[in-house]
Image: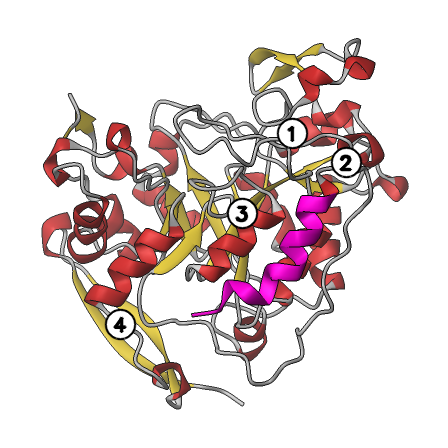
Amino acid sequence: MASFQCFAPFILLLLLAGCSARRVKPVPNRRNDINKQPLQTFRAYNIAHRGSNGEIPEATAAAYMRAIEVGADFIETDILASKDGVLICHHDVVLDATTDISNHKEFSDRKRTYDVQGDNTTGHFVVDFTLEELKTLRTRQRFSFRDQQYNGKFPIITFEEFISIALDAPRVVGIYPEIKNPIFINEHVRWSGGQKFEDKFIEMLKKYGYEGSYMSKEWLKQPVFIQSFAPTSLTYISNQTDLPKILLIDDASSYTQDTNQSYFDITSDSYLDFIKDYVVGIGPWKDTIVPVSSNYLQPCTDLVTRAHNNHLQVHPYTFRNENKYLHFNFSQDPYNEYDYWIKHIRVDGLFTDFPGSLNQFQEWTDPLAVGRNEEPGLLNKDFQCSQSSESCLLKTFVLQARS
């Protein structure tokens, strides 16, 4: 496991940045270090949802560095665009919930109401602020029941800064960026030459050397999954890159922002058969896989089985440690929840707000032996599933690494 001490100078700089408007530059990178520990590919991926945001405000450099320290395989983020077209890491299209913008009187006249995926939303929108203006803001914890001590300390970071954090890590750490609200962003932000949001997104990944199909030599060097709730964004970028893509899936009653399809239709056999030519997996909301009633799990759907039958990975979201998010079946113990989803539902990755607890569970139940990833092959998954979601058998075999 990487030591957090490797990032201590950068964290100190970030804390100092909370007292000034100075832009922080990444530490000298170690991206060409051939001695880096490789990405583990032998167990379900530990995906740090907006970093270790259960501890530190989401989508900040500190949250991502903490996630790397505690064992995340991938650091995950949402990508939006500023008024001047710079790609940034921020989940909401509005700034109000997770920044101190309400304290900035100079922006008091910037509140707007826009249509966002069919809903009239009011707030201070990312697309109405330049990067320079966004950098004057400081982030805060989204949930009041989580640690508030880091509020006001960390700035919003750019996509480029996010990438640098992963590349500068002392071991190989993947990134998991989302093309967020592409319909809204393309409507409000314009780039030269008629480029779209998706074009700028891929351009940034190429700039930093991200290339290769899933499990290829190139991909293993700099792992990435590209995610989106918008199917057309994923099919569009398929003409530009063979990097692996994940289609996110919301509640079955919700509709896609681009094709106006219900996610119930998105999870049909016919659609999975179609989308498998463009993506390597799906990222469903947990309750789409296992419905919940009165905080108790209901019978499992066959979505995971059907996805595996189509050779699609399944990375559900979002796992959280707090009692209010843990179903009674798990005695409100996050380890019991991880055990259920990994060993019984057999998912291939988990989005978690607490990557440290997931890593502890995995090291306890399926430890990474020293040198395990140095074997001549890397795990690939061949799914042989019956029609019953309860009897899906996971068969594994080793693919010889290609030179």
Q: Residue at x 18, y 53 (%)?
A: 339
Q: Is residue 307 shown above or below 99?
A: below
Image x and y of residue 262, in percent: 40, 27
Label drawn at residue 183: 1
> Which badge, 4 or 3, comes first in the chain's sequence?
3
Q: Is residue 114 left or right of residue 225?
A: right
Where residue 149 sits: x, y (%)?
A: 52, 34
The amino acid sitting under disc 2 is Lys
Mark 2 neighbour class, 10 Å CA radius: few under 14, some 14 to 19, many 20 or more: some
Badge 3 is on which residue? Answer: 63
Residue type highlighted by circle 3: Ala
Q: Position of residue 261 (x, y in %)?
A: 45, 28
How far apart are the alpha carbons under marks 3 and 2? 17 Å
Q: How crowded is the residue under tag 4: few (<14 C-alpha within 10 Å), some, or many (20+)?
A: some
Is 29 placed left or right of 244 in the picture? right
Apparent side of residue 271 relative to residue 226 in the rendered image (left or right):
left
Q: Which residues are magenta?
A: 1-16
Q: Given the image, on which type of amino acid does mark 4 rest?
A: Pro
Which residue, given by chain and number where applicable, does mark 2 sit on? 135
The numbered mark, 1 or 2, whose residue comes first in the sequence reads 2
| Marked residue nearer the N-terminal end (3 or 2) | 3
**Callout in the foreground (4, 1):** 4
The amino acid type, in three-letter code, at marker 1 is Ile
What residue sits right under mark 4 in the picture? 367
Provide residue 81's location: percent of width, then percent of height: 73, 36
For the stretch drawn in magenta, the main secondary structure is: helix
What distance separates the C-alpha of mark 1 from that of mark 2?
24 Å
Instruction: Kindly indicate the quadrant of the structure image that contains residue 167.
Output: bottom right
**Of 15 and 39, which appears nearest the observer?**
15
Residue drawn where x is 68% and y is 48% of the image = 14
Decide: few, some or many residues near mark 1? Use Cα within 10 Å; few <14, some 14-19, many ≥20: some
Pick whichever of labels 4 and 2 is earlier in the sequence.
2
